[in-house]
Amino acid sequence: MNGNCILERVAETRSTNDDLMARWRAGTLIDPVARLSKKQTHGKGRAGRTWYANGDDSLSFSLAFPFHKSPAALSGLSLVAGLAVIEGICSALNTSERALYQQGLRLKWPNDIVIGHAKLGGILIEGGQTAPTEPSWMIIGVGLNVRSHISDAAELKAIHSGPIGGLDQVLMQGQALPDQDYIWLNLVNAFERLCTEFDQHGFDPFIERWSDWDAYQGEPVFTSLLGEKKIEGVASGIDHTGAYQIQTGHAMVAIHAGDVSLRKQA
């Protein structure tokens, strides 16, 4: 593991993303910081959604990382983060990417990790740049369900209506779940490595790697974004910026924001 990443573990906080965002705004971030909390009372997901974090059944942390380019040049970071989650899971479970793929693990654009149609986890990225000569500090929040049968299922279902996945679903026969701190350390190591690679080489080296994990490649899909017209077509992968491409009846459309969902067939 990179020796200059500060590791912090707390029992409870409002939001690890909020904690690190406050330090960025105050100008007190110097080295990368990974902050894990057993319980988050106001965890959050993308687009203002709630992320439920029960420390017994889920793992929630945030990483503050400095990039030496402008925020505009960081498109595709959420997709790189998804790949880092997969790499970290492989390392923590001592398994191969091929084995995880066969178990149904996939990435759903732009920021979800899924097993089949069940949500295993999600990613939220915040941050920015205070001046052109300063690094872009990005706060990458990660939430993962460790167990698929969680103790507070009723509370979770109140804020997440879809099926719930967990790391316990990708274990090999007879394999036990590792300690959560061990999983976290492996994830942080993967994030440091891939974020450094992304900072140095951009998004191009990740396009094919992410496409291999695309949950909807070749499937009929539609987009949903508040205030925007729904787009329907066939999922056709990502472009060099990380935008999702949908082949409609007339053109290839690049989607830069919103959600992409499977379209039910009649």
Image (tube, helix red, strand yellow):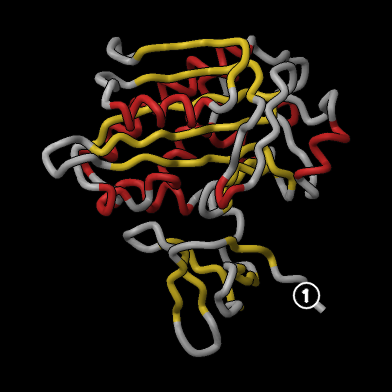
Label 1: how many Cα within 10 Å (few below 14, some 14–19, many 20+): few
The image shows residue 243, relative to residue 195, as above or below, that is below
Please identify the residue farthest to the front as the structure is shown. 26
- Looking at the rendered structure, the number of numbered marks drawn on it comes to 1
**Residue depicted at x 27% and y 35%:** 197
**Residue depicted at x 19% and y 37%:** 68
Q: Who is closer to the viewer here, 205 or 242?
A: 242
Residue 250 appears at what percent x and percent y?
A: 49, 90
The image shows residue 112, relative to residue 32, as above or below, that is below
Q: Quadrant of the N terminus?
A: top left
Please identify the residue farthest to the left as the structure is shown. 133
Q: Which kind of residue does numbered mark 1 sit on?
A: Gln
Please identify the residue farthest to the bottom as the structure is shown. 250
Residue 20 appears at what percent x and percent y?
A: 42, 26
Q: Horizontal placement of 176 versus 123: left or right?
A: right
**Residue depicted at x 59% and y 48%:** 48
**Residue depicted at x 51% and y 25%:** 16
Q: Quadrant of residue 258?
A: bottom right
Q: Horizontal placement of 76 versus 199: left or right?
A: right
Residue 221 appears at what percent x and percent y?
A: 63, 70
Q: Who is closer to the viewer here, 41 or 232?
A: 41
Residue 91 appears at what percent x and percent y?
A: 51, 21
Q: Quadrant of the C terminus?
A: bottom right
**Residue corresponding to mark 1:** 265
Q: Who is closer to the viewer here, 167 or 259?
A: 259
Secondary structure of the residue carrying tag 1 is loop
The image shows residue 42, relative to residue 204, as above or below, that is above
